[in-house]
């Protein structure tokens, strides 16, 4: 009985839900992502590779400049742990703080209780590992579905690619490329 009531509630909610992706609507929310990458480290003295697992938390605020097209700003915090796969071995634990613009486009019409979106972002920020401090730039592109609970709230599932370049002065440079899986929660603030 209880399952039937919950199922009926969800069916009614999704059948009347639709997105607000009109021009002049604000978008507020955030996402969390998981990544798995191969890391290549290069310095004047040696090179090494490692397997990296990371998490990233990213709040965002955006604005629909056209119907279906939003731009905005996204700060983020990420933490990576890596195991070095070359002969030297070892582990690393890295923290990053980044901020930068994003652009997202919704492909379907707003009358549907779901949509497909693509999200592209570029962030720049600070890198910290032990006493090493540096800068980093990250480009990411993701695509996936969003399911609306009502006209304002959506849950999104994204799959994508990212590339990060980190530099610590003239000491070393690191490049990471890999895939990421994310889940996000967005609120479309109606007029």
Image (spheres, helix red, strand yellow):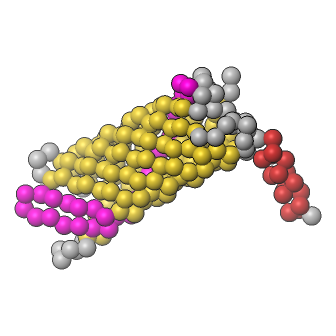
Q: Is residue 175 left or right of residue 13?
A: left
Residue 46 belongs to magenta span: yes
Asked if residue 26 shows in the view, the reply is: no
181 is higher (above) or lower (below) than 136 = below
Quadrant of the drawing holding the N terminus: bottom right
- Residue numbers of the magenta segment: 38-66
- Residue 132, percent across and down? 20, 51
At x 40%, y 47%, the residue is 140
Give the image quarter of residue 76.
top left
- State the residue in front, 41 or 82: 41
Residue 67: image location, x then y, percent: 60, 28
Q: Is residue 133 magenta?
A: no
Would residue 88 be visible to someone looking at this image?
Answer: yes
Left or right: 163 as drawn, with respect to 144 = left
Q: Is residue 19 above or below residue 163?
A: above
Q: Quadrant of residue 134?
A: top left
């Amino acid at each position: 009985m209880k399952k039937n009531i919950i199922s009926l509630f969800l069916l009614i909610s999704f059948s009347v839900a639709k997105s607000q992706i009109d021009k002049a609507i604000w978008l507020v929310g955030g996402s969390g992502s998981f990544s798995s990458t191969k890391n290549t480290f290069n310095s004047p003295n040696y090179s090494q590779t490692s397997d990296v697992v990371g998490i990233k938390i990213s709040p965002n605020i955006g604005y629909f400049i056209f119907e279906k097209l939003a731009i905005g700003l996204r700060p983020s915090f990420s933490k990576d742990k890596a195991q070095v796969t070359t002969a030297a071995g070892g582990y690393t634990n890295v923290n990053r703080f980044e901020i930068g613009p994003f652009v997202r486009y919704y492909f379907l019409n707003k009358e549907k209780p779901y949509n497909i979106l693509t999200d592209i972002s570029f962030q720049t920020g600070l890198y910290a590992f032990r006493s090493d401090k540096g800068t980093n730039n990250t480009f990411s592109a993701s695509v996936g579905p969003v399911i609306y609970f009502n006209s304002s709230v959506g849950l999104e599932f994204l799959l994508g690619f990212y590339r990060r370049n980190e530099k610590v002065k003239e000491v070393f440079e690191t490049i990471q490329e890999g895939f990421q899986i994310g889940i996000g929660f967005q609120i479309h603030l109606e007029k």
